[in-house]
Image (cartoon, rainbow, N blue to C red):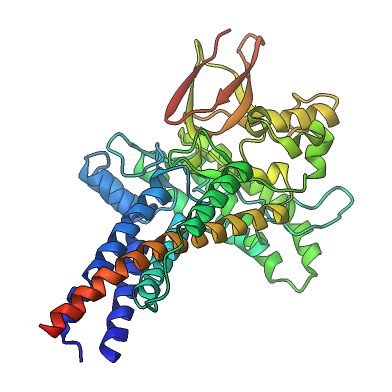
Amino acid sequence: MIARTILHFILLVLLSSVAISAEKTSWTTEEIADDFLKRGLLTKEQHALLRSNEFLDSDCKSDKHSSCKPRINFVGGQCGLTGSVDIIDEKGKYTPGYTTLTWDISQLGLRVEQYPAALKAFNKWNASAEAAWTELKDVHSKAVAIANSGAKRVDKLKQAKPLLERAEKISEAMARAAGFEYDGGCGAGEEDSQIVRFSFPEKPKSALYILQMEFDACKRVLSDPYDTKACEAWMNIQSSNELSGLYRYRVVWSDGGISEKPFSALSKGKKTVEVSR
Amino acid sequence: MMDFSDFVRAYGKGAALLFASAAVSYFLTYHSTLSPPVKPREAIYAMSVLVEAYGILVGLNAERTRKPRPGLMIAAVAIYIVSLFSLTFLIPTSESSYREAMGFVCRPEFLDLYGPSCYWVTPETLAKASFEPNRIWEYWSVQPVRAYLSVVWLVMVWSVVLSIALSLRQTTFKKARRARSN
């Protein structure tokens, strides 16, 4: 009886551990970096700088897929830095955000710590990058001071809001200057999205997209739904975009011409949207 | 007293059934559109295997008078399939063919924009909302649907495995008894 019980128990433990470890669905940055090194997509020097860098990313969903290439995404797989403070409206009314202030500040800290290595790995660490990074570092110190102050929680959020928004802008500018991705947002999970790329006949002045539902909401509330400052759901088109559903793009050309059209991401795999003038 | 070789022989079929059912539920969980809308999928798979293991133990150790009830098994499968297809939608962009749960209370923001279409949602409406239930329905009304489907899935797994184990039991133990008496 005892032998049987023990055997049952061992069987259960074995099977449940097999079940849990049966399919590995996520990879650590180290594993991704090692894989890229093995496939010759990163040099040894780049590998050393990027191995534990949270901003190293791969350009496709299944990180170990043989066609994946390394890229740097300065958002680092997070939703951005303002999850805790986005929820304060003009009247100062507060509802709990989807992140906490300390989480957002710790993410900013990670950027301060790891952006230089990411930039150095691709020879993008120059005087202007260093100046932007110094400002980011300064914003981080101020945010840490606010988090440690004895103020009320709502007041801390109000004080931190402009700083975190500033940090977001600096990060995005740094990414753009280096030609890196700044691919944020907390939409459908990556694995449930389609990779959408855009092709342009010429370099546009600006290229944005928006989810149809967000556009309809902006159209309903705002006098100008194309005002990207008022309608914050407009996102910059990246070289690779993980999307799912119905969207519309709006491209402004260098001569001031505008192309605007709905597009969809409704199937698996990759897709290229041809933008015409 | 049963010696170890008898014991292993008696449980051979049970082990085979366990591996077979674990393999089937692995396929259903990861590679079909039939798994319940729960993430991570490892969670529902691990629970399924535990339920299967326990179902097999109960089935093989059941009293002789206990008979498998195929009607109950078919009813559990039917309830799960009907519930799944009426309470979930397929995300067309999902590489892993993930089905997401619907909710039963619409968000006021959604009602403002598209009216009560969330109560009888169309693929176009889902696409406009990026197939994210939290844009359409209140979060608290989606969670019970996920929980309900998970429970029905586990009940279905339990009833199927138990029925098979019960029908295997007699031959398995008869052989073991015969082996012991020889």
When asked about the image quadrant of residue B96, the answer is top left
Q: Residue at x 86, y 54 (%)?
A: A92
Q: Quadrant of the C terminus of chain B?
A: bottom left
Decide: is B125 above or below B41.
above
Decide: is A255 above or below A235.
above
- Relative side of A227 to A194, left or right: right
Whether residue A134 can be seen here: no
Position of residue B181 measured from the top left corner of the image (x, y, whole percent) = 14, 84
Q: Which residue, as the protein is rendered here, is positioned at the far right?
A: A91
Which one is nearer the viewer's eye here, A69 or B146?
B146
Q: Quadrant of the N terminus of chain B?
A: bottom left
Position of residue A18 measured from the top left corner of the image (x, y, whole percent) = 31, 64
Q: Residue at x 27, y 81 (%)?
A: A7
Q: Which residue, as the protein is rendered here, is positioned at the far front?
A: B65
Q: Residue at x 41, y 46 (%)?
A: A118
Whether residue A161 can be seen here: yes
When asked about the image quadrant of residue A143, the answer is bottom right
Q: Residue at x 67, y 52 (%)?
A: B142
Q: How many marks?
A: 0
Which one is nearer the viewer's eye here, B79 or A275?
B79
Which one is nearer the viewer's eye here, A73 or B161?
B161
Position of residue B50 measured from the top left corner of the image (x, y, whole percent) = 41, 68
When asked about the image quadrant of residue A149, the answer is bottom right
Position of residue A238 measured from the top left corner of the image (x, y, whole percent) = 52, 30
